[in-house]
Amino acid sequence: MSSETTPSNNIVEDDLDDVLSQIERPSRPSPISASLALGWRALLKIKHVPFQLLDVTAFPLMFTLLFTFLFGGALAGSPQQYIQFLLPGILVQSIVFITVYTGVGLNTDIDKGLFDRFQSLPIWQPAPLVGALLGDVLRYSMAAVMVVGLGVVLGFRPRAGIIGVVLALALVLIFAFSVSWIWVLAGLLVDTPESVMTASFLVLFPLTFVSNIFVNPATMPSWLQTVVSVNPVTHLTDASRGLMHGNVALMDVTWVLIASALIVVVFAPLSLYMYRKER
């Protein structure tokens, strides 16, 4: 009996040797390379669906034009005068609004089952979240360049020059990266992308409009001035104006960095916990 099975086992082993690869298995990707690869994937989504660029191009430009010419004459005497005050603020508003698309895109990928595939791969498990955030930082940068470029065309002249503008953009991107973790958590908690968008309106509208983006808070009631003074968007706007015009207060920059760190410390662990729970 054994003499009949031995040739058969040899045949099976030979077949397996033919099927299985003889090449040594590649090493596991590092967390950085896995995150960068998935960040590149986020950018390729824009290539294949160019319509996604609408949120980082058309909307920021539309806000800049509307607010400059609607309120410029009434608030500062002319649009050219008003845009010196408005542009750093409208830059903050545009990018903070765009951060919500991080949660919308994440929720869409989860709904399609794509994250189930990611979670089955031998990669650093937070890489899909970190990669999506890295890809979105480039989208924020594109929106910032569009807003500043349009502002220069309309007459915006930063007194601190290009270095001040670059420093202001860097600070805004740091804050946007931290706020994106809020929408990552929202994308993991709710059922549909529409729910992420609806929830964002409840946060972003008061956060951006109850601030000093459009007008000087000195004209507001005292109780509202108190609310505005503790809003991190107010300090981000003040810091951006100061960096662009050469009169920055270090306290505003410190406030923004502390607020960004607190947001990441609270929402990043919660997001990673919910992500692992999905497994």
Image (cartoon, helix red, strand yellow):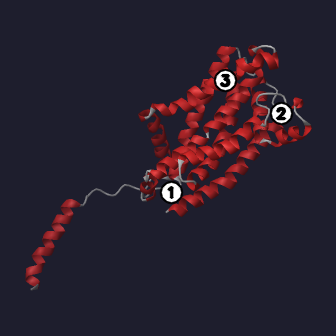
Q: Residue furthest bottom?
A: 1
Res. 64 mark = 3
The amino acid sitting under disc 1 is Gln
Rendered residue at 57%/41% (across/down): 101
Kindly identify which residue carries mark 1.
125
Looking at the image, residue 26 sits to the left or right of residue 9; the answer is: right
- Left-right relation of 226 to 30: right
* Residue in the foreground of this view, choosing between 142 and 184: 184
**Lower sequence index among marks 2 and 3:** 3
Number of numbered discs on residues: 3
Residue at left offset 57%, top offset 43%: 102
Residue at the image position 73 percent from the left and 36 percent from the top: 208
Label whose residue precedes the other's in the sequence (2 or 1): 1
Q: Say if 83 sits above or below 188 in the image.
A: above
Residue in front for this viewpoint, 106 or 25: 106
Task: In the rendered structure, find residue 249 and report the number of the disc placed on it.
Answer: 2
